Image (cartoon, rainbow, N blue to C red):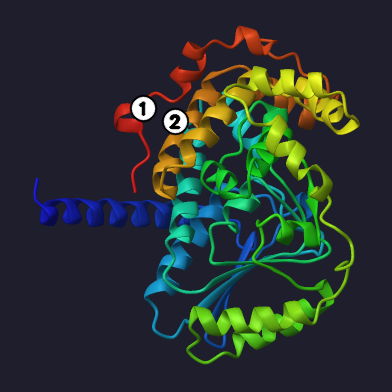
Amino acid sequence: MSITVLTSAYRLRSLCRLQRIQGHMMSTQVETDVLLEKMGRAGVITMNRPKVLNALNLTMIQKIYLQLKKWEQDSETDLVIIKGAGGKAFCAGGDIRVITEAAKAGDSLAEVFFREEYILNNTIGAYKKPYIAVIDGITMGGGVGVSVHGRFRVATEKTMFAMPETAIGLFPDVGGGYFLPRLQGKLGLFLGLTGFRLKGRDVHRAGVATHFVESKKIPDLEKELVNLKSPSAEDVSRVLDSYQNQSSLDSEKPFVLEKHISDINRLFSSSSVEGIMQNLKADGSEFAKKQAETLSKMSPTSLKITYKQLQAGADLSLSDVLVMEYRLSQACMRGFDFFEGVRAVLVDRDQNPKWNPSTLEEVSDQIVDQCFSSLGQKDLTF
């Protein structure tokens, strides 16, 4: 097949997607779940569901995607800023309970949601204009997906970053398989398996954020960014650097994991999750005991999927990682642990999930490999 035919097919598919999204959005009544504004020569996206910590729903994802596409082509728009409303959260993740209910009912939302979300993540990763995520507050799951793949991520002392998906029978998706293995040493694997929470300046020190700026300085920072005239990425970087240099809060405190980094690199170096657990139990230190205890509460299937996802993702492009993660998302929708995890953590809140299989040893390589299998015509395409 010629490149011309392939390009035409790709354009047609993109056009059909845009038309489908526009049709869906015209039929929805929600107007304010995401605010899309033009300020000077900047496009500003504000996720606006503060009561649910700005959790992403399908409409928000579709609106943001469409607007990003428009601004990318617009000669009057030089950069994009994305933030969350309410002061508590940037975005705490996707609207998991809605997805769970849909999947239980056999509704296609569970297919469509992950598909559209990952397409948005890929769009952000390939965005041609400076994209600045102000991750001021809770940033988890889907909130990581709309920030971490952008060129600039600004953390504040209020930032709380985590990928806690293994606790609900899922895996660190939204491109976690791409960015986690690219953090220093085994840090990404540690964060992905345990769901460990990083806060404030530590989000920058870990390499998740590109900058740290005190929360009170954010309004001035946004104002300066909005007023930039035809900025390059270097111009944006200079502004962010200058605000970071003015932010000394907590600078004297060491990185929360500093004294454990060599332990993490040693203990999480193994060819299997079982091997990691053996390392932790044999080590005997308080830190190792704590991590072993944390992992023992997670879905064994999720732990094994996550381990393989991050191993594979280290050598893949973001778009290839997202194709892999879409397969994994649909495997989780077909499985048991995701529904049980959501029940235990978010619905009944008894924090006592009954995983099936219940041990790492019972999760065979065959079970894991099946999760990575092609979906054929239903595979994610860009």
Q: Is residue 136 left or right of residue 9?
A: right
Type of amino acid at the residue the image marks with label 2? Arg
Relative to residue 256, is residue 2 drawn left or right? left
Type of amino acid under label 1: Leu
Residue 7 relative to residue 337: left or right: left
Residue 327 is tagged as 2
Marks 2 & 1, CB-CB < 8 Å contact: yes
339 or 152, nearer to the observer: 152
The crowding category of the residue bearing disc 2, from other C-alpha atoms within 10 Å (few below 14, some 14 to 19, many at least 20), is many
Badge 1: residue crowd in 10 Å (few <14, some 14–19, many ≥20): some
Q: Position of residue 337 (x, y in %)?
A: 65, 20
Q: Position of residue 83 (x, y in %)?
A: 67, 66
**Residue toward you, 267 or 6:** 267
Chain-order first, disc 2 or disc 1: 2
- State which quarter of the image contains the N terminus: top left
Above-or-below relation of 117 to 266:
below
Q: CA distance from mark 2 to mark 1?
A: 7 Å
Looking at the rendering, which quadrant does residue 95 occupy? top right
Please tell me whether mark 1 sits on a helix, a strand or a loop.
loop
What residue would you read off at disc 1? 375
Visible residue check, residue 195:
no
